[in-house]
Structures are given as C-alpha cells and as structure tokens.
Image (cartoon, grey):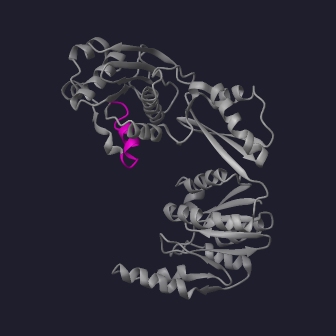
Amino acid sequence: MLLEMISTGEEVLSGQIVDTNAAWFADCMMNHGIELNRRSTVGDRMDDLVGLFQERSLSADLILVNGGLGPTSDDLSAAAAAKACGVPLMEHQAWRSHLEEWFSKRGRTMAASNLKQCLLPQGAVLIDNPAGSAPGFRVKLNRAWLFFTPGVPVEFKQMVNEQFVSFMQQQFRQGLATHLCKLLTFGHGESSLADRIDTIPLPADITLGYRPSPPHVEIKIFARGAAAIASQDAYVKTLQTLLGDAVVSTHFPTLAETVHHLLLAKPASLALAESCTGGMLSSQLVDFPGSSAYLQHCVVSYADAAKISLLGVEASVLARHGAVSAETAIAMAQGARSKLDSDYALAITGIAGPDGGSTEKPVGTVAIALCDRQHSFVQVVQLSQRSRNLVRVMSCAVALDMLRRHLLGTQPLVSYPFLPARQSYREAHS
C-alpha cells in the first residue's frame, strides 16, 4: 500500500502556522508500522487542489487530505474533490438534519454558511465527525481512495484514530504482522547513538528509525513478520544494555510523563523552585491528570530577593557564589522542600540568554539540584549554542532525569555526553 498525505490551506503553505497535524499523522502511521510515501502541501486555490488530487491519485493507493472542509469561501476541498472526480456537489440530507439538531440542542441558530458543510461530491461516502460540524468523506479517484478530514486538530485526530485507521486496515490488509518498540533517550546525539547501535548486527526484517525531538531522541524498532517479532525483544534488550544511561524510558514519550507515573506509584510528594525556567518544569508535570497527588507547589523565584524571601536562600550564599551556582541551587531546593516537608524538591537556576553571560558563567550555564530528606545532588551543566527556549527545555529534562533516576534507586548524577557538566556533587544535610 502506498500512503500519502495532502495538507491544504494558505496559512499552512505560507508557514503562518506549523503543520502539527502532518507530523502527528506521520508518527501515528509509523506506530502502525506504515511509513508515508509522500506528503504534499497546497494552498486554497481551486485549480491547484484539483490538479494535485488528480496527479497523486494516479500513484497512491490511499491519500489522507486534511483541511478545507469549513463553512467559509476559502474552504474548497469538497468542491475541488467533486471537480476532480467530474461529479456535482450534492446536499447530504442526513448531515443537514444532524447539524440542525446539533445547533437546536445548544440553543443556537445555524448560520446559512454552515449549509456548505452538507455539500459532498456525488457518490462520496460520508465520514462522521463526532467533534465538529464538518463531516469527512471519502471518494475513489483513479487508483486511490481520498479520505478527507477537517483541519481542526481535535476533530482530525479523533477521525484518524476511530475511522481512518479501521478503513485502511480493512481496505488494505497487510500481508505481514508488524510490531513497534520505542526507546526514549536523553543526553546523547542522534549520530553518536547510531554509531553505537551500528556495532551490533540488525536482525532480519527489523528496521530502525531515529526521531530527534529535543530534548529527546526516540529510537523506533520495527519488526515485520512473525520471525522478526519473535527476535525483537532480545534485540531491544541488547540495545538497552548497549546504550545504558542514554535510555530514559521504554513506556512513555517524555521524561515528564515517566516521572509523573513514578511519583504516583511510589507515592511521593514534590516541590519545585524555578528561576530561568519560569514555571516550565511545573507546567510539564501538570499537563498530566493526577499530578495534584504529588505536586505540592512551585516557587518561581526569578529575582534574588524572591530567592531570599520565598525560599530562605541566605544572602551570603548569593553574594559569595552568585544566583547561578551549585550552592544557590541546593539552597533553593532545600528551601522549597522544607516549606511543606515534601519528599523531594527540584531547583533550577541559570542563564538562558541570549544575554547575561560572562566569561566565568557564559550563556547556557544552568545549575540544577535535587534534594530529599537526607541528601542533595547538584550539577552545573553548560548548554551553550542553544536558543533561550531550548536552554530552558533541556534544563527541565536534566532535572526530571535526576529525579527519575533517584526514584528508581540509581545514581541521580550521570554523564551526559551531549550536555557537558562543569560541576556535580552530592552532599548530606546537616
């Protein structure tokens, strides 16, 4: 099966918005063991849409078309599909009744423009949209099925998961069983990971994929066929042994989600003190339902005065070592932990840039501390040549990885080849 995707919209083509739907869809398909053969982007112009639908339908077996199903004049996908197929648009009576009832139940008057969303190419098969007013549909053109979906992400993703995948599997039954395993890594570059992995033989019918998405690199291990699936577990275990500390999760796509589940399982409480990350660390954790079971508070102590008054950092520590130092990070973590007697605390203080660095402490210098009731662990890392946002993202990842390792009973301080540490140590509380 040759699978393609077409993204529509001037705002996507011109770069005014990032096409997150396309990235999500490609990853979703890879999780099903299927790789896209091609991805195209086209603007809201009738001739371009018709031409692209006709061109790609001669080569692909299945095309996911995303966007252009709204009620406004620049939503042209249905009309373009009808023109490409050489058929008229016809009103879908059942969908019109559905829309009228949908608006009536909510006490709203349906705008006349919404009736446009009831027009589908003659002969098209309607695809239900449980989350929105625009239905999807599919049509057969030349050798390909074109499967049309709205561009609103929540609607698009639900329709892919609930309807597109089942249609694809029924229409194009795969000859071989497939299975996918993932290894989430941190602190190592894609090329260095590949160099290490290439030293061991790759079993037959197993392929590797690398997906760098800072702060992580995800390694995907595809097995195709019963024999490959049978050998996959042993190969994955060999990779984990080979990569060692680089692997930070085999179950979750981020360090934040990994730590979230570890804290819930322990159970344990957590306090946070953030300076240069400005609340990013706490935000990553509260993205997950249930985080209130362990996250007690986060103090964003950007100014030195806040570190002193809110966290109890001694002014002499700041004067002697500076706001960006191992000593200040430990004091921040201990102050945050003591406020509500939390089991653990994390603290981050650094220079995110692009200004504010010095010869002694250049931009990208970040001190990160973890403390429990008995000990503190701290490291000062150098995140040079990175954007302000990436310095903050990587700092949060280091902090989360320190806590992850501690929760698993391993050494919180490890060497990250991709993130050189200037200083790291452990100290007992007095």
Q: Residue at x 62, y 70 (%)?
A: 148
Q: Is residue 389 magenta?
A: no
Q: What quarter of the picture does the C terminus occupy? A: top left
Let me know if residue 323 appears in the view.
Answer: no
Q: Residue at x 77, y 66 (%)?
A: 55
Q: Quadrant of residue 396?
A: top left
78 lies left or right of 87:
left
Q: Which residues are magenta?
A: 274-290
Residue 342 place in picture, x, y as percent: 28, 31
Residue 225 place in picture, x, y as percent: 77, 49
Q: What quarter of the picture does the N terminus occupy? A: bottom right
Q: Nearer the viewer, residue 15 or 195?
A: 195
Q: Residue at x 22, y 32 (%)?
A: 340
Q: Quadrant of residue 235?
A: top right
Q: Nearer the viewer, residue 366 or 222?
A: 222
Q: Is residue 285 magenta?
A: yes
Q: Quadrant of residue 53?
A: bottom right
Q: Residue at x 70, y 51 (%)?
A: 33
Q: Residue furthest left?
A: 309
Let me know if residue 144 appears in the view.
Answer: yes
267 lies left or right of 318:
right
Q: Nearer the viewer, residue 186 or 75?
A: 186
- Would you place residue 214 above or below residue 371 in this image? below
Residue 177 place in picture, x, y as percent: 74, 53
* Number of marks in picture: 0
Residue 152 place in picture, x, y as percent: 51, 64
